[in-house]
Image: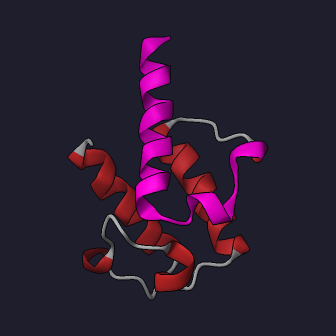
Amino acid sequence: MDPTTVEKLKQIIASCKKQVVEANIHQDADLMRDFGFDSMNFIHLVTEVEMEFDIEIAESEIDLAKLSSFSRLLEMIEGKIAVKADS
């Protein structure tokens, strides 16, 4: 787990939902349950993540139920960054 990626993701989450404080975001955080993310917030988050990390997230991969946990979202981002670096 890259600390820079973790911090950037926390910043993006906090910017997408103004009530969220970066310090409250942790590995086990659930974006829906803990921070009140809805589908619109999540789409905004995905767009910001794509731009910040220069990755593409396919529509078929956008599943709020699966990616609402901070750790799963982080795993997906790091996986896409790794694939991009290998190509």
Question: Is residue 14 found inside the magenta-colored segment of the image?
Answer: no
Please report the residue visible at 50 percent of the width from the left and 11 percent of the height from the top: 87
Q: Residue furthest top?
A: 87
Query: Against 56, is 85 above or below?
Result: above
Q: Quadrant of the N terminus?
A: top left
Residue 4 position in % (x across, y down): 25, 47
Nearest the viewer among 30 and 4 is 30
Residue 74 position in % (x across, y down): 42, 50
- Helix, strand or loop for the magenta stretch, by majority: helix
Residue 28 position in % (x across, y down): 36, 69
Instruction: Give the quarter of the image for residue 75.
Output: top left
* 47 left or right of 72 in image: right
* 40 left or right of 52 in image: right
User: Number of callouts in the render?
Assistant: 0
Query: Against 10, is 35 above or below?
Result: below
Residue 57 position in % (x across, y down): 65, 41
Instruction: Give the quarter of the image for residue 42.
Output: bottom right
Please report the residue visible at 52 percent of the width from the left and 35 percent of the height from the top: 54
Q: Write down the region rendered in magenta.
A: 60-87
Please report the residue visible at 41 percent of the width from the left and 38 percent of the height from the top: 78
Query: Against 58, is 17 above or below?
Result: below
Nearest the viewer among 51 and 3 is 3
* 24 left or right of 54 in image: left
Please report the residue visible at 51 percent of the width from the left and 32 percent of the height from the top: 80
* 67 left or right of 58 in image: left
Question: Is residue 84 found inside the magenta-colored segment of the image?
Answer: yes
> How is colour applied across the structure in the image?
secondary structure
